[in-house]
Image (spheres, rainbow, N blue to C red):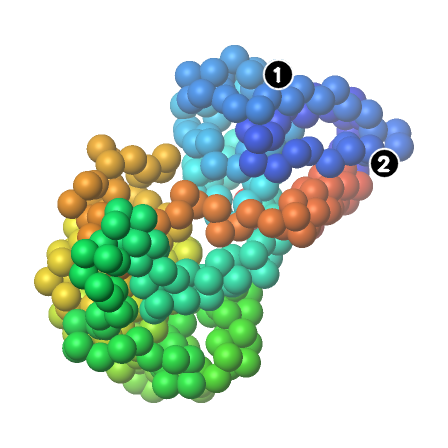
Amino acid sequence: MTQPNKHHIIVALETFFCPLPDLNLPAPHTCEVREYERTKPDQIAERIRDADIVIITTIPLRAEVLRAEISPQLKVIGVVASGTDSVDLAACRARGIRVANTPHCNTVAVAEHAIASYFAIRRSIALTHTLIRSGEWPKKETLLKTLNGPDGKPPKTCQDEVLGIVGYGAVGKKIEVTARALGMKVLISGRKGAPAPLPDGRTSFETLIRDCSVIILCLPRSSETLNLISETEFNTMKPYAVLVNVSRGGIVDEKALVTALKEKKIAGAATDVYLQEPASPGTSPLLTSNTADLNLVTTPHVAWCAENTNTNYKMALMDNLIGWLTTGEPRYPIV
């Protein structure tokens, strides 16, 4: 079903993440485009008041700005990201607002970032970088033991690693291919607490946490996955285990992670995501000054960032818009 309206007001609220593509709509459709590099939450209502289509990445669109009296013309929300947890989907369903995401666009970038993070913590790169710049090498004569895990042994190489992947979507599958090429043994996790028998090729979550030397998280955040990794899991892990989180903040209990590192229950951790973002020492225990001596690598939610990610985002966004205009159905519908 094509759209009866032929002229559309398109409002993009945060183009600093990814520039808009050329919005050449199929005839007879035309558009007026309003681009904002950044938008504060208290500016949303004013900016989307007469929008037909809103394009976002992470800014929250909650029920109050999705009310008919606030955004009466709104018909489509295009999310330039895989995750749509920033959008009140129930409010959209109630009003018949279509929501579409742009999946799989950052698969390669996130997978490569996860593997890079693994090497950074397994080789203690960030920690030794800090120590050598602060003059610790001549003081201690050697920083060799900085690379040792809590078990007192030097770091493992890929051929001796057992990687556990929690979250087996496009990113998880790409990480698996890369890890196997590096010589790692790979296990794929079942759902936490899932009863036997598990699907073919899956390892129970509990077994994976207990047996793997590397654990990479690349799964969506939901009520089921909040604090998926917490004190119980850290107490179960191998002392030489390292943890990489490229999924969403809140999946790892941040306080429990700091405690596990301080008490040397695991060898290291890397995260690209935080419970509250943008993160700072005031909002995340992972970033306070008392974590500076830990084998902890923190990056500011940039795993997705790559030239080909932006190209893919632009193509997927246009596929969604053209699909909705010409058939009534976005290419990648969520609602």
Residue at 66% across, 20% down = 34
Image quadrant in which the C terminus is located: top right
x and y percentages locating residue 4 in the rendered image: 78, 29
Q: CA distance from mark 2 to mark 1?
A: 22 Å
**Neighbour class for label 2 at 10 Å: few (<14), some, many (≥20)?**
few
SS class of the residue under badge 1?
loop
Residue at 55% across, 69% down = 174
Residue, disc 2: 26
Q: Is residue 112 at least partly visible in the picture?
A: yes
Residue at 73% across, 42% down = 318
**Neighbour class for label 1 at 10 Å: few (<14), some, many (≥20)?**
some
Above or below 154: residue 256: above
x and y percentages locating residue 117 in the rendered image: 41, 61
Query: Which of the 4 image quarters holds residue 328?
Result: top right
Q: Is residue 279 left or right of residue 8?
A: left
Q: Is residue 238 at least partly visible in the picture?
A: no
Look at label 1 and name its amino acid.
Asp
Q: Is residue 143 left or right of residue 320?
A: left
Residue at 52% across, 62% down = 112
x and y percentages locating residue 185 in the rendered image: 42, 85
Q: Earlier in the sequence, mark 2 or mark 1?
A: 2
Above or below 55: residue 219: below
Mark 2 and mark 1 residues within 8 Å of each other at the beta carbon: no
x and y percentages locating residue 226 in the rendered image: 28, 54
Query: Which of the 4 image quarters holds residue 269?
Result: bottom left
Residue, disc 1: 50
SS class of the residue under badge 2?
loop
Look at label 2 and name its amino acid.
Pro
